[in-house]
Image (cartoon, rainbow, N blue to C red):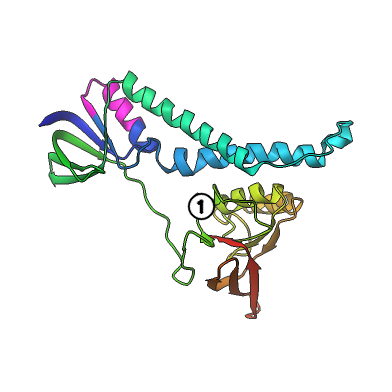
Amino acid sequence: MSQFDVVVIGAGPGGYVAAIRSSQLGLKTALIEKSPTLGGTCLNVGCIPSKALLDSTEHYYNAKNHFATHGIDVSGLSLNWDNMKKRKDEVVSQTCDGVMYLMNKNQIKVYQGHGSFVDANTIQICKADGSTENMQTKNTIIATGSEPSSLSNVPIDGKRIITSTEALSLPSVPETMLVIGGGIIGLEMSSVYARMGTKVAVIEFMDRLIPTMDLSLGKEMQRILRKLGIKFHLSHAVQQAVASDDTVVVTAKNKKGDEVSFKGEYCLV
């Protein structure tokens, strides 16, 4: 049975950094991650891929809307969504490879599988093929992250009612999209698709965007995103979302108590 000074469960930004520091301090360290790649949500389906798409769509939007002002003729300009997604995936792959490089450089043993406690000093790894492996550890760092809470009246099916993970890789650019929630992630993906021509409507329960941040930031964000054609419906309480084969209908109540409906090809929660 392998023995370690420190075992870190979870290879996200918290976990892999903790593993690196533990190794730098002279501790024999192992890192357990259930996903095939390291980096957690941020590197794989969060911060990194979303920023890659923000970068690509900004180039497209500027070419389409601003280049002519500078005397640059871009007639015949077209968007290749598949290639844009391919670049996004390459950025993610390179970043994840960089994390693995750091693991090897710092002599950290990486295990793929689901880590759980047998006792305070024994960790069991359940691997993808069903086999298990135990290891001894003096110390354990739990860095498993978290999962977003969901709305009970908005059942996410991953097809029409989606999360940001699915939004990163839709098969084609939709004509319309509903976004429930005017927080950072919702606005980020709203701007990605709005730049590509999607008619986006954001439905927010609070009376302002990014409600956890300064009021002035929310107002400025709304002003900027309106220029992209994004429509905002603030102070709207979502009642339900019903998906069909090719559309989603979201029902909400506005601040007057009136029930209103919104329709789109996808609903991002």
169 left or right, relative to 77: left
Q: Does dot 1 land on a helix, a strand or a loop?
A: helix
Q: Nearer the viewer, residue 230 or 17?
A: 230
Query: Within the magenta stretch, is there residue 23?
Result: yes
* Residue 178 position (above or below residue 80): below
Residue 131 occupies which quadrant of the picture?
A: top left
Q: What's the residue type where badge 1 is placed?
A: Glu
Q: Position of residue 229 (x, y in %)?
A: 75, 55
Q: Residue at x 56, y 37 (%)?
A: 86
Q: Position of residue 126 (x, y in %)?
A: 21, 44
Residue 205 occupies which quadrant of the picture?
A: bottom right
In the image, which residues are magenta?
Answer: 17-29
Q: Position of residue 233 (x, y in %)?
A: 67, 66
Q: Residue at x 86, y 33 (%)?
A: 73
Magenta span dominant secondary structure: helix
Q: Nearer the viewer, residue 185 or 157?
A: 157
Considering every residue shown, the one lying at the far bottom of the view is 258
Q: Position of residue 107 (x, y in %)?
A: 27, 21
Query: Within the magenta stretch, is there residue 268?
Result: no
* Residue 2 position (above or below residue 206): above
